[in-house]
Image (spheres, rainbow, N blue to C red):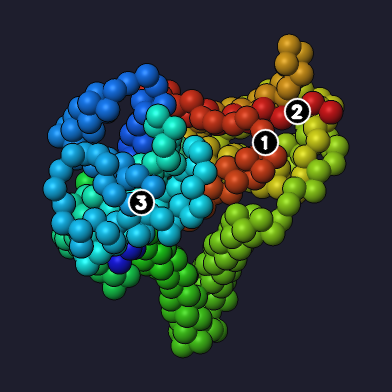
Amino acid sequence: MWRYFTFFALGVIAVIALVCYGILGNAVLSQAKRRVRSVGGDMVEIIKGDVTANEILQIITDYSLSDGVDVFIFDADGKLEMPDMTLSEDKIAPVYEALTARIGEWEEDKTVEYNSRSGNRTTLNFAACVSLDGERYTMLVRFPVTHIAELVRRMELYLLIVGLGAGVIAFFISYSLANKLSEPLREISGTAQKLADGDYDVQFNSAQYAEIAKLSDTLNYMKDEIKKSEDFRKELVANVSHDLKTPLTMIKAYASMIKEISGNDPEKREKHLDVIIEEADRLTGLVNDILSTSKITAGLEQPNKKVFNLTELLYGVINKFSYLQETQGYSIMVDVEAELYTLADEEQIYQVVYNLISNAVNYTGEDKTIYISLRYNAEDKRINFAVRDTGKGIAEDELAHIWERYYRSKDSHLRPVKGTGLGLNIVKVILQKHGFNFGVKTNRSEGSTFYVDFPSA
Ligand code: ADP
């Protein structure tokens, strides 16, 4: 990151420096050239005009004093006519020589511009052929730019020094900026490493920048979810292994008893075999539940919808529980309309109805009564199914959890229920897949009512 920043800063500085070099050198020199040309043009006009030699001399002196521009006027023989000053022959002769070499043959109004160098002195020149009182003269406007060139060089040097200084500063700023930007990322990556090593108590808390704060939040959320599923996994292994082990231990224990003690006593043997069968059934139930919830949740079992008689299906389930009425004093109060048809996966709906009624039976109150209703609602063309018990209801804080997999209430119920905590989860997943409305109304004094709204078909 700091390398990119530094390259970027150096690039910007280089562009600025190049632009400054170009502008500085060209602008100053072309400004001087323009000045020389304009003085030369003015002088040609002045000489052509109606002015005396004295006035010309005055103007030449003014230019020399105010602009540092020297104007020389030579006659046809190369003698310096103006300004009226004593200049040694060896100084003026090379100037005139260069002038005639450039201008060539005298021709009225001919002008030439050129640069001349002697030693380290640079001069901009503007030469013109002018006639004055019928005589041929050559005028030379000279502007020494040695000091300007020197100034430009100096400024270029300063520019280089400033550029290098700015480069160094840019490097340090880039370095610290990059560090500041990447520090929270490094911190997050360190925390993620700890999390990967199995420490779920870590906290992502980099909040210097909005984006990174958001990333921290997301990672914290992810961590919580991972922790939850890890806890869930541990709990699941504990619960399931307990639930599987208990019946297996019982089966083994009773089988041993039959072998060693009750084998020849038909009455005892019957009793012990019943326990074995009961426990094996429980085991089968548990395995089936686990299988069907995993299959449904994993999306392996998509609802296979068709129209079927819901009333008949409900009676089928109720019949399964009729032995409870006969043997254990349960009352199942039924309020069911005949011939109601719905469109759904019949097998899955059977499981839903079965699980809900089975829960009501398990959790109902001392009166051992449950109420089942199935009614067609003409208003919204739905079939309302409800199963009510008279138990203790469900605590507010548990209500949200009862639909979760393997969730079992901590509440002690009237009858110790050998549940798996899977029943309601299966109900939820199936009904969600179908898109049916369902829920529970519960009250601590009146019990719970689980309901499902089926579409009428
Ligand atoms: P379980 O096998 O424990 O019955 P479920 O998924 O069917 O598992 O139910 C989850 C939990 O919801 C139960 O442990 C119980 O606490 C609560 N619950 C379900 N149905 C009822 C009900 N009719 N009355 C009171 N509590 C209920």
State the SS at label 1.
loop
Kindly report the distance in space between the C-alpha atoms of the residues bearing marks 3 and 1. Answer: 115 Å
Are the residues tagged 3 and 1 within 8 Å (C-beta)? no
Q: Position of residue 205 (x, y in %)?
A: 22, 51
Q: Position of residue 269 (x, y in %)?
A: 54, 76
Are the residues tagged 3 and 2 within 8 Å (C-beta)? no
Residue holding disc 1 = 435
Q: Is residue 119 above or below residue 343?
A: below
Residue holding disc 3 = 77
Q: Is residue 30 visible?
A: no
Instruction: Estimate how packed mark 1 is, as few (under 14), some (14 to 19) or many (20 or more) residues with alpha carbons within 10 Å.
Output: few
Disc 3 or 2, which lies upstream in sequence?
Answer: 3
Q: Is residue 135 above or below residue 256?
A: above
The residue furthest top is 379
Q: Name the image quarter holding the C terminus.
A: top right
Kindly report the distance in space between the C-alpha atoms of the residues bearing marks 2 and 1. Answer: 10 Å
Residue 390 falls left or right of residue 168: right
| Among the 4 quarters of the image, the one containing residue 297 | bottom right
Residue in the picture at 47% in, 84% down: 256
State the SS at label 3.
loop
Looking at the rendered structure, the kind of residue marked 3 is Asp
Residue 455, which numbered label? 2
Q: Nearer the viewer, residue 416 or 164?
A: 164
Residue in the picture at 36% in, 25% down: 46
